[in-house]
Amino acid sequence: MTNSPLPDPQSSPKDPLGFDEFIGILVALSTIGSILFWAVSQKPQSLNFIGVAPPELVPATRKSASRSPVPPVSASPSAKDPVAIVPGERGKLPTGIAAAILPIQKAQTSPKAAAAIVPRQKAQPSPKVVGAIAPGKKAQPIGKLKRSGIETLPKIVTAVPAVSAARKASTPAKQVKFSDVPANLWATPFIAALTQRGVFTGFTDKTFRPYQAMTRAEFAVRLDKAFNKKPEEAATAFEDVPNNHWAYSSIKESDMAGFMEGYPKDYFRPAKPVTRTEAIVALASGLDLKVPANPEKILQSYKDAAQIPKYARGKVAAAIQAGLVVGSNSNLLRPNQPATRAEVAAFLYQSLVKRGKVKAINSKAIVKP
């Protein structure tokens, strides 16, 4: 019996190459080919991997005298803009800023670059200047820093003229026109001048009421506003002027300055209308006018001179001689009639002229002895 040869064992069947493996191999080959093509196409001096090494392992290079490195320009890139890191330079990036290590190459201008290598040049002044420059003043730069060929732009200082407090205080108040004070009224220039100085004020309806009678308390307030005279005597404690009276301070000042006096038993009668004689005598007393040698000769020019009280005749004559008396009728003094607001304004203004505080007004209403 012969032994028959054993049959050859059949090899295990192999699976064919799948589609996924084929795609993976194709992508890998394409990537390798792209890298090789990029490496071959670059210039030899462009391939510089020294920048990725630590500085202490990089050999010292010879500095070129022709070109000096430009210091990195400080910038504040936004989170959306990429930042190029130059090899050999270290720095920290803000959170959220994308970074890419690029090989050394010639600087390319990019409209979105936050930090770029620029050639050495001088900075040009900005065409937009914020701030006003006073006339006659030239803009002066605040310091100029020169470093590695970069100059800082000049900063413009805004020159603002300073207004002193004294100048503000000397500015007169705005002149107010009243509806019941016509331009042809004899007292208009006196009213306008004292209103501008703040001695008089109008009413809420924009009227002055020039023919309205003035009380003794109101007259004391106008005296206090018009004059700044030092006290000459102790204040009188008037029985009818309590400390909470609206004109208490002005009444006290006018009494201490020698302008006004009270009635017997220390009564002031603040609500009583001040007469023309009382107003004239108060001004003559406060200004320390001397009684003329022959007062009756001065008073005789008035048709109603006999109505002037005996105690006031010398003071009234002194006031007439000093030019303090003003009125629409130079022949009548009307000594016992209440003084109106217009008449008091004229008396006060002429008193200020006498003291040299204001300029004289040329008016036909001023009584001349």
Image (spheres, helix red, strand yellow):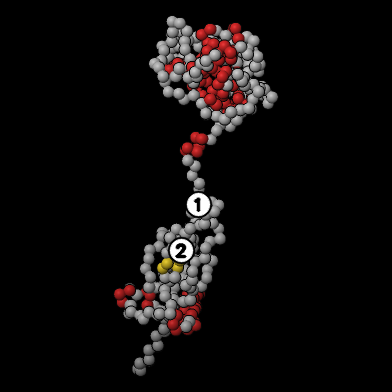
Residue denoted by label 2 = 152
> How many other residues sit within 10 Å of disc 1, few (<14), some (14-19) or many (≥20)?
some
- Residue closer to the observer: 128 or 165: 165
| Residue in the picture at 53% in, 51% down | 134
Considering every residue shown, the one lying at the far front of the view is 293
Q: Report the amino acid beneath label 2.
A: Thr
Q: Is residue 207 left or right of residue 146?
A: right
Residue to which mark 1 is pinned: 158
2 or 1: mark nearer the eye: 1
Please state which amino acid type lies under the numbered disc 1. Answer: Thr
Quadrant of the snapshot with the N terminus: bottom left
Q: Assign a secondary structure to mark 2.
A: loop
Residue 68 seen in the current view: yes
Q: Looking at the image, which is closer to me, 94 or 120?
A: 120
* Inter-mark Cα distance, 2 to 1: 19 Å
Q: Residue at x 37, y 89 (%)?
A: 6
Mark 2 vs 1, N-terminal side: 2
Q: Position of residue 140 (x, y in %)?
A: 48, 58
Residue at coordinates 56% horizontally, 19% vertically from top-left? 321
Residue 41 % position (x, y): 49, 83
The answer to which of 291 and 250 lies nearer the viewer is 291
Q: Nearer the viewer, residue 257 or 121?
A: 257
- Taking 229 as reference, is 94 above or below it? below
- Quarter occupied by residue 204: top right
Check the image and report above or below for 348 versus 334: below
SS type, badge 1: loop
